[in-house]
Image (tube, rainbow, N blue to C red):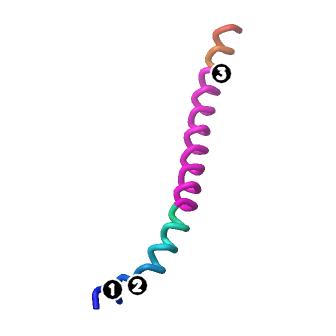
Amino acid sequence: MAGDAFFAVFPILTLFFYIAPIIFLVWFLIRFLKIQQEKNQILKVISDKLDKLVK
């Protein structure tokens, strides 16, 4: 009886193992792009301050 439950859940688990890496990759790329945007904003502020200092 317990084996039947396992075989019923097995297709769902295999589907999860195929989809989970894709979801993780999309999440990682979105997070990476947000961090890069924040870094670019900080560097732009620093660049603007240096330009004002030089002039």
User: Residue shown at 54%/61% (left/top)?
Assistant: 23
Mark 3, other Cα within 10 Å: few <14 / some 14–19 / many ≥20: few
- Write down the region rendered in magenta: 21-47
Please say if the residues under marks 2 and 1 sit with CB atoms less than 8 Å apart.
Answer: yes
> Mark 3 belongs to which amino acid?
Asp
Q: Image height check: is 29 above or below 38?
A: below
Residue 2 percent location from the top left of the image: 28, 86
Q: Which residue is mark 1?
A: 3
Residue at the far bottom in the pictured view: 1
Nearer the observer, 49 or 16:
16
Residue 37 percent location from the top left of the image: 61, 39
Q: Which mark is residue 48?
A: 3
Mark 1, other Cα within 10 Å: few <14 / some 14–19 / many ≥20: few
Q: Image height check: is 44 above or below 35?
A: above
Element type at marker 1?
A: helix
Describe residue 4's horizontal placement relative to residue 37 as left or right. Answer: left
> Mark 1 belongs to which amino acid?
Gly
Nearer the observer, 17 or 2:
2
Mark 2, other Cα within 10 Å: few <14 / some 14–19 / many ≥20: few
Nearer the observer, 9 or 38:
9
The C terminus lies in which quarter of the figure?
Answer: top right
User: Residue shown at 40%/84% (left/top)?
Assistant: 7
Please say if the residues under marks 3 and 1 sit with CB atoms less than 8 Å apart.
Answer: no
Q: Which mark is residue 7?
A: 2
Describe residue 16's horizontal placement relative to residue 49 as left or right. Answer: left
Residue 48 percent location from the top left of the image: 65, 21
Q: Earlier in the sequence, mark 3 or mark 1?
A: 1
